Image (tube, coloured by chain):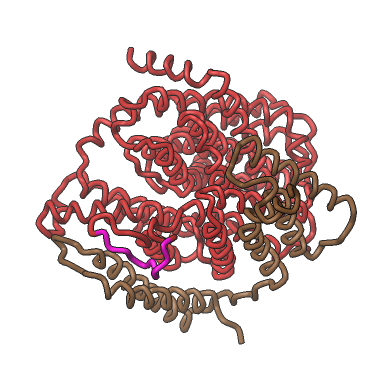
Chain colours: A red, B brown
Amino acid sequence: MDTISHLVLGFEVATSLTNLTYCFLGVLLGTAVGVLPGLGPIATISMLLPFTYGLEADTALIMLAGIFYGSQYGGSTTAILVNLPGEASSIVTTLDGHAMAKQGRAGQALAAAAVGSFFAGTVGTLFISLLAPPLAVMALQFGPAEYFSLILLGFVASIVLASGSLLRAIGMILLGLLLGFVGVDVSSGAARFTFGNINLLDGVNFVVVATGVFGIGEVLASLDNELGRPAAIASVKSKFLTREDWRRISWPIVRGTGLGAVLGVLPGAGALLASFSSYALEKRISPNADQFGHGAIEGVAAPEAANNASAQTAFIPTLTLGLPGSATMALMLGALIIQGIQPGPNIISEQPGLFWGLIVSMWIGNLMLLVLNLPLVGMWARMITIPYQYLFPVICVFCAIGAFSLSNNTFDVLAMALFGFLGYVFRKLHLEPAPMLLALILGPLMEEYLRRAMLLSQGDPMVFITSPTSLIILVAAAGLLASVLSSSFRKVREEALVEED
Amino acid sequence: MKVSQDAASGAVLTAIGSISLFVASGYFIGTARSMGPGYAPVMVSGLLVLVGIALLLRSRFVADVPVTGLRLRSTVMVLASIVVFGMTVEGLGSFLAVLLTLMCSAAGSARFRFTPLPILGAIVFSAACAGTFSVLLGLPMPVIGSWLQPLLFN
């Protein structure tokens, strides 16, 4: 069978000594940044991106992917032990995970999260290997109108998932699009918004924006309340799940995995939506519904499985369509492009080693994470206690080196400082920057697809509705937007997103 | 006076939208069939102005969280540390630039004290950075920069 020979090829690539080493480095770093509140995968991946130029494309991708899904693991550790979501997607885990920790069952919560995540990672890997090839074939039929609608769907999803007001999130998308216009327009050759500065002709580099807004901006925001009381860390006693625990978490993990795998494929949906809809589902159907919020182990296992499954399957649209669903995936896409590889429907046939190697490495990485997280949880717990005044100067240094090494240019470093300030102001105004980053990266593509679609249709905007695929996508986007305005979804959304800063 | 987050974001977005609308209106717009470089920017800036105005209007009618002030010390020191890095990395070299960035940003913390152990740590970390990035990874930033080389090697 094809799938098997592909996975064998993937195994050969992923188990080379170099790739194994970088995979390990990636998940190790990922766990670390996931554990540390105030340093997320977006800042880390963008800081490290310039240093992967010298690596082979598959090695670079394997490491960056490891940082991404490793941070999902690490985030749950902090969520359970300190009641702080290390990652946005582990907000839900704080609800029951920390309640369990307060009852002295922190170890069981961690084990449930790890088992759920590992199972989900395994299924997610299989899911990609089965679904990505047919999707790539389908994507070959997509024209500019379909791509334009897909990007729009991604924007709508990221607006829906942004915390706080929808209007502000829309504003941030538009701001990102504007930033994307800066530089030479590809079709006319006209310089736009460059204000006569030659450094801006190539556009605003997304790494500069990401390290500035998410790295430096986050540092400034954290320094705002640095004199707050240090968090208390729950201690871990036994990590063994009882037979009763296993019985309670098995089906929630399976359901969470299924839900997460499907939601991960949707552009813009991502880990956050997966984890909270899986929590909502379990709360509705569980026989122990009354325990939710007071330490129900299902409430930890299911959303953790869901967020890990979606973290894996989020690679499907990124790799096969070239359309990242989230800001983190957009960075992965950027990494591929820097390596000279154009993601899209042809990537599976043109770069089989890269594609299948990456997929298999994610499974191997998940196995490493299981080992890294369960026995070593004490080490990670100690990392949470590193005082922030020692941590943030180091973050500043890495951001500065990262920005400088993009093109050995002082301009990029100064621009990053500016975006750091903007990132701080955005947080003050409760303007969420993730949609802006997504729009900055996808904006130029979107404009190009719009142009081409309108050229083909002779200026008739109906083309977006007359193409059935495009129509379905637009209806999905409209449905998503409408669902936010409905009161019940709004309540879940507010509950899940309220603590996101 | 307390400014709500809605009012402040509305004002910022309206201002950015208006400026870019003004700039973009100078570009060739074209038609829907054949879009010029100004077509999409004008649309996006126009929408941004609308969103900004909507936020401003909402702030008049819906109570919202007030904006808290920026913390001056950390903001200035952290941003200055980045600027210092950018200005000195080629001249002073990676070791000193990293050390300066560390010290400058650390001074932004309210817990900052001049004590020997953290300073020693900073020196070790700077040396490790210079070793990793300049020597091992071979990034084009010298360990000892162009300003210092004449002093040392003359």
For this orientation, the residue located farthest to the left is: A458
* Image spot of residue A54 (x, y percent): 52, 34
Image quadrant in which you'd find residue B52? bottom left
For this orientation, the residue located farthest to the bottom is: B1
Q: Residue at x 55, y 65 (%)?
A: A418
Q: Is residue A341 above or below residue A180?
A: above
Residue B125 shows up from this direction? yes
Residue A92 shows up from this direction? no
Q: Magenta stretch mostly in which secondary structure? A: loop
- Nearer to the camera, A53 or A151: A53
* Image spot of residue A80 (x, y percent): 69, 43
Q: Is residue B87 magenta?
A: no
Q: Residue at x 36, y 75 (%)?
A: B49
Q: Is residue A196 magenta?
A: yes
- Nearer to the camera, A218 or A407: A407
Image quadrant in which you'd find residue A339? top left
The reply, left or right, for residue A451 in relation to residue A53 is left
The reply, left or right, for residue A400 in relation to residue A459 is right
In the picture, the quarter occupied by the N terminus of chain B is bottom right
For this orientation, the residue located farthest to the right is: B116
What's the magenta region? A189-198
* Image spot of residue A217 (x, y percent): 60, 61
Q: Is residue B1 above or below residue A230?
A: below
* Image spot of residue A443 (x, y percent): 35, 56
Q: How many marks?
A: 0
- Nearer to the camera, B24 or A107: B24
